[in-house]
Amino acid sequence: MPPSFDQQVIRRTMRTGVTGHNREKAEQGYVLYTPLGGPGRTLLIDMAGETVHEWTHDRRPGLYGDLLPNGNLLYGAKIRDETWDIFAMWKAFKGGEIREVAPDGTVVWRHADPMHHHDQRRTDAGTTLYLSLEKVPDELEKRIHGGHPPPDGKGMYADMIVEVDAAGAEIWRWRAIEHLDPELERLSDSEPRWEWTHGNTVAPLGDDRVVFSMRATSTIGIIDKASDKVVWRYRVPQMGGQHDPRPLPNGNLLVYDNGTQRRWMGVLPHSRVFEIDPRTDGIVWEYTDTPPFNFYSQQISGAVRLPGGNTLICEGARGRLFQVTPEGETVWEFINPVFGETVMGFDVNMVFRAFFYTREELPFL
């Protein structure tokens, strides 16, 4: 059934497609994104906003796909199974299966885990890292501070990071309930106690380390896989649901800071993107808008540093993808024109993450 007239407010009022392009200052290439609404499509567009390649999936996104060096797509698929209703919001970000999909749509590899959610990454060694979930023991749940009781009272869950080899065999598992301190990892007051951590990112680093992001506790960190210890931790409650701490070649991390707990003039939340040096905790670059509340996504989102120094930002809740210079000038902007219904019944053009590729990185074109 198509959305009602009232549900189509955003469709009627939002301008979509490419809304601006400074060809002299914007880095030229291709952008890949997966609309969250609808049955499952991953689109590769050029700088004019035209689709040059498309993957169609038989499962909704759970929550995105990005390209591997061989040109295949690593895609999180949303599988409806026995875990579908373990708590009210779970189905919104649940995955359940990780797929490697060739440009012609052939699924060449898959790994199933009913508790997989949000993120999956292929490492240089050919293994796959992803986020999973498990129940928090009752005694530990009592020691976890903050949050508010969820309406269904089904208990609390916490993240695991899992690594599997090409055959799907597990070779490493890290459990938040074993390695995080409930005295340090306090839930934001606005977070329901369905989850302790709500991980949304896991990414491989050099020296056998892994970076993670946990929305519910406003924490990003780095794990040493040999010891399972969190060797670096950055927690600022005002980040309020940050996403996508992305490793940069210089050793820094590029972070989408959603800012749900930050208030401009004590009233209005707003987002920012910042680059942090984990060696000093210094913020070495930042993007904000003027006024700050013009740029805000209360959930999802991410950012990618481009080869020439510009940054591609995904303001996910609005389906807005835009490129800024190091000085913060917007030089390309695209609003996702693909609307569709999510598993929550919302008609949206949301995008979880977006990626930039040069022509040389796209062997199938």
Image: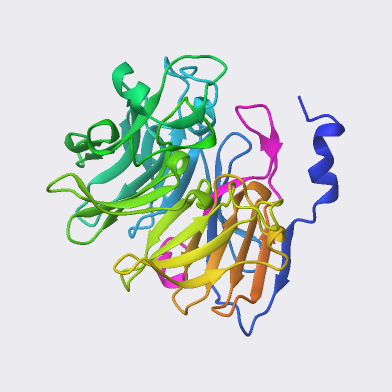
The single residue placed furthest to the bottom in the displayed view is: 24
- In the rendered structure, the answer to whether residue 146 lies left or right of residue 20 reads left
- In the rendered structure, the answer to whether residue 321 lies left or right of residue 177 reads right
Instruction: Please tell me which residue is depicted at 43% across the width and 29% down the height of the picture.
Output: 195
Percent across and percent down for residue 335 are: 69, 56
Q: Is residue 347 magenta?
A: yes
The single residue placed furthest to the left in the displayed view is: 226
Q: How is the image coloured?
A: rainbow
Instruction: Please tell me which residue is depicted at 18% across the width and 34% down the height of the picture.
Output: 169
Which image quadrant is residue 361 in? bottom left
Percent across and percent down for residue 41 are: 56, 43
Instruction: Please tell me which residue is depicted at 67% across the width and 61% down the height of the picture.
Output: 334
Instruction: Please tell me which residue is depicted at 47% across the width and 80% down the height of the picture.
Output: 308
Query: Which sits in the foreground, 175 or 34?
Result: 175
Q: Quadrant of the N terminus?
A: top right
> Range of the magenta residues?
337-365
Percent across and percent down for residue 22 are: 68, 79
State the count of labels. Answer: 0
Let me know if residue 57 appears in the view.
yes
Let me know if residue 48 appears in the view.
no
The relative height of residue 114 versus residue 304 in the rendered view (above or below) is above
- In the rendered structure, the answer to whether residue 123 lies left or right of residue 93 reads left
- In the rendered structure, the answer to whether residue 141 lies left or right of residue 294 reads left
Q: Is residue 114 magenta?
A: no
Percent across and percent down for residue 237 are: 49, 48
The relative height of residue 206 versus residue 127 in the rendered view (above or below) is below
Query: Which sits in the foreground, 29 or 322?
Result: 322
